[in-house]
Amino acid sequence: MRGGVGTVKQLPDSRSAVVTRPLQRHAVPCRMSAALIALLSVSGCSGGVLDAQGPIGAADAKILLNAVGIMLVIVVPTIIAILAFGWWFRASNTRARYRPEFVYSGGIEVVVWGIPTLVIMFLGGVIWIGSHDLDPFKPISSPDKPTEVQVVSLDWKWLFIYPDQGVASVNELAVPAGIPVHFSLTSASVMNMFFVPQLGSMIATMNGMVTQLHLAADKPGEFYGQSAQFSGDGFSDMNFILRAVPQDGFAQWIATARQSGSALDRTSYLALCQQSSNVRPFTYRTVDASLFNAVVNQQLPPCPGPNIEGPGATVRPRLER
Amino acid sequence: MFGKLTWQAIPWDQPIPLVAGSVVVLIVLAVLAWVVIKGYLPYLWREWITSVDHKRIGVMYTLLGAVMLLRGFIDAIMMRSQQAAAFRAAGYLPPEHYDQIFSAHGTIMIFFAAMPIVIGLMNFAVPLQLGVRDVAFPTLNSTSFWLTATGALLVNISLVIGEFARTGWLVYPPLSGLPYSPGVGVDYYLWALLISGVGTLMTGINFVTTILKIRAPGMSYLRMTIFCWTALAANLLIVAAFPILTATLAMLALDRYLDFHFFTNEAGGNMMMFINLIWAWGHPEVYILVLPAFGIFSEVISTFSGKPLFNYRSMVAATMFICLVSYMVWLHHFFTMGAGGNVNAFFGISTSIIAVGTGVKIYNWLFTMYGGRIRFATPMLWSMGFLVTFVIGGMTGVLLAVPPADFLLHNSLFLVAHFHNVIIGGVLFAAFAGITYWFPKAFGFKLDEGWGKIAFWLSLIGFYVVFMPLYVAGLLGMTRRLQHYDVAAWRPWVLVAGIGIIIMICAAACQVVQFVVSIRRRDELRDETGDPWDGRSLEWATASPPPPFNFAVLPDVRGEEPYWEIKRRAIETQQLSAEPKYEPIEMPRNSPTGFITAFFCTMTGFALIWHIWWMVGLGIVAAYAVFVWFAWRDVTEYSIPAEEVARFDRARRQAREQWLAQHAGQPA
Ligand code: HEM
Ligand SMILES: [Cu+2]
């Protein structure tokens, strides 16, 4: 983990990033996946990770499909050979020649070590390049200044802080479409995983640490987001909607947020901190600018677990509903 | 007096665990009562519970694994039905219960179903294949088994007293730490695995010693069967990996019991350390399971193709290659923790390199079939099912080893489908193949082939119907461990998986019927020759079931396929080798050490879970005392007189004479 325990990593100045790659969707046509396997095609067109709606998701999905393609080149013939050999050499087939002495062949030995090695070398290249290009910490090159969002996972809801705009929201995330978003993420309690399947890469959130993630949505739309790391009894409701809106829509959303809701300061944070699940989305009018860092530095202590005062709570604690 | 243990520990208010628990308790009591009333208790005690015979221990391990497999399967049925019901609804299992079920399912399946079956089959077959009379440390072997049973028992006690962990099968902190899991669930997990882990480590030491040091005359390393090689590799992995597991879980226990801060959020604890350590054990663990499975398939495919294994040496090399590389890949379980491009790339590539070794094996099996004369008996069907299924599972594994792809699929149902694809298609199919293959050796009669084949086809179809939809659901973004969900696109796939589980239930029922039918028809299915499959390795050179000493005279090994060669020689010369000179055989005496130690360990574990400190002290002292008492024994062996040995072997020779008469004039 870069940044280390209990330290805050300086957020990179995204303007200094070299503009080499225009923000553009690497299209993954449904056609292509359909040609691969039916399974992939089904999921390629209906809101999953193959139906990518942003550059990162598209690039991830492209690598995924390429890797499957590379492997199918040897996997399909292998499966066919297994079935064919099994069928042809069945004991009842009198036309098959029984060759019990055929137990070694140097040529075959070379081929069986060689072919998988070659495939893996090829795939190794894909892995090496992909790991670096799509490192979640790596900024997306774009002429636009990315939207900054600080993410705090709590038991069991998501807090999104907009440091530049001074507002915050819970279980609802609005971002301008077509502009990269830079997420800085931490956790107030246990580990979680921030994941918007259609936008791409997920990343862990951990207490006392900051991870980073760069995503972007190509077009306006609503995308399902969730935690991809089990975090306790309220986990199943720990999801949110990421709303990619046009630029002016975003300004409007911020303006609305500034007018309603309460203020997020240390006191209201401590209230939010308590375990709760299935929390309806809401927004905070203002936000304490140092809150995120205070959570990361543990100036604000980790949020508490279940209440252990109740009878039997240290035997079988129950989720309060 | 009883620590945290009060009547409240029993879930009176939760009908499902209460009813399930009572049924289990009733069944156990009924079986016990039946055993006592029928007067089987002394027999069980003498011949099984205190037995140090590797074959008996192997059978008990396998039986324990099979029972736990059923328990884990019931958990699976509950999870699949809950998810089928819980679309925009609460389903019938509340989160605090559902979370226990998936945690218990994973824990039970890996530690108390798959491991015992694999270790059981190794116990049964390895000494026979090496041509020896027992493992290096027979009493230790019995102790290992009973400690494993202790762990299984503790996990199952949690069903009725208290709760099980609700953290997933690898109890990641900080969720598993005291602040977020104040209940006893994680403690059950910890002590069950700490105790059974010691047992597993001792098994590892035992088998490494046995394979390296105790082999029949002439059995050089490169004449051992591939099953023995894979057992060696798996046990080397156990010896190196299980201490990591024990240390890691011990650290978590210190966090929970003595307020240490290894993995806590505060005071400099680091949960990433836990995740690294647990996977430094966890990845080798999957190879501990699957390498012996590869070994079983190697035996089965070669036997039923009527050919030696193709490229034997290459197979050995691939096994040891996998054994080594499986230590260098653990980080692929958390690419999404943000380690950075270089680290992720390194571990991604090292992971896919393992697939080379696996690929080599697949092709060697393929060419073993080439030019063979394949008999599709049940074990061979399982092997064919494995070959096809495992290739798919391996492919999705390598896909998950590509970090950008894993960024989309980590912790999704795609991941769940991957590891079930390799564990069911690899380990479980091997377990069924191995059980069907060696059953006649262990009990003297074959399993019913008809029911076996039905069970195979239903399992195969059921597997695909359950898990292929989960691949799709994963690609649609569905994450694992959801108690309920709202996304409509996932629903059809979850429902199909729910239908698949019905097929799996039928498959499991057929397996049970297969055993019942076979036991009832055992006289028809009797195997007199000791060699029902026309086998090639030494376990078939002795009677079915083998006498306690396995071989009247240790075999003289002259090649890679000793029994095949013995048979060929007999057919060529039209006679068996001359009757040897029989000598008395010394065998280790039975000992209750293992059982009693495990009894006190169970007591200690239970007391630790419930903070009953006096009982902790008592249990530890008593367990240690048993060990001292055992170490002090004077008589360690008993002698089987030469006449007894001769009687056994002459009966065996008679059966082989008959076999020879049937094969008169036939080419080998
Ligand atoms: C071709 C060889 C294999 C490769 C390349 C491979 C790769 C992987 C990868 C990369 C993951 C992590 C994915 C993630 O968490 O996002 C994974 C998970 C897993 N694999 Fe495999 N795998 C292979 C074979 C096996 C075998 C043979 C087994 C078991 C017998 C196995 C059991 C598992 C299990 C249990 C998990 C997930 C555990 C968890 O997260 O709870 N894998 N595999
Ligand atoms: Cu692994």
Image: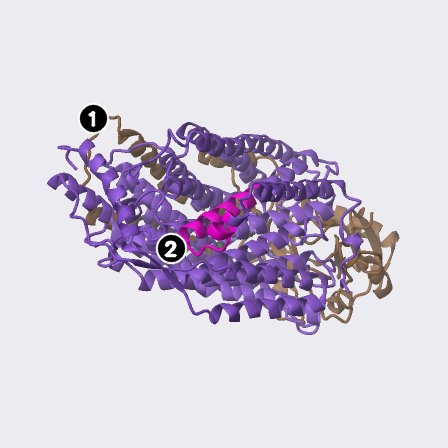
Chain colours: A brown, B purple
**B64 inside magenta stretch:** yes
Local SS, label 1: loop
Determine if marks 2 and 1 fall on one subunit: no
Residue A120 screen position, x and y as percent: 37, 52
**How many numbered callouts?**
2
Local SS, label 2: helix
Quadrant in which the N terminus of chain B is drawn: bottom right
The answer to whether residue B384 is visible is yes
Residue hosting label 2 = B231
In front of the other: label 2 or label 1?
2
In the image, taking residue B65 as reference, residue A311 lies left or right, namely right
Please report the bounds of the magenta region as a residue range.
Answer: B43-70
Q: Nearer the viewer, residue A259 or A288?
A: A288
Instruction: Give residue B573's quadrant in the image.
Output: top left
Quadrant in which the C terminus of chain B is drawn: top left
User: Is B449 placed above or below B631 here?
Assistant: above
- Dot 1 amino acid type: Arg
Residue hosting label 1 = A95
- Dot 2 amino acid type: Ala
Q: Nearer the viewer, residue B564 or A315?
A: B564
**B13 inside magenta stretch:** no
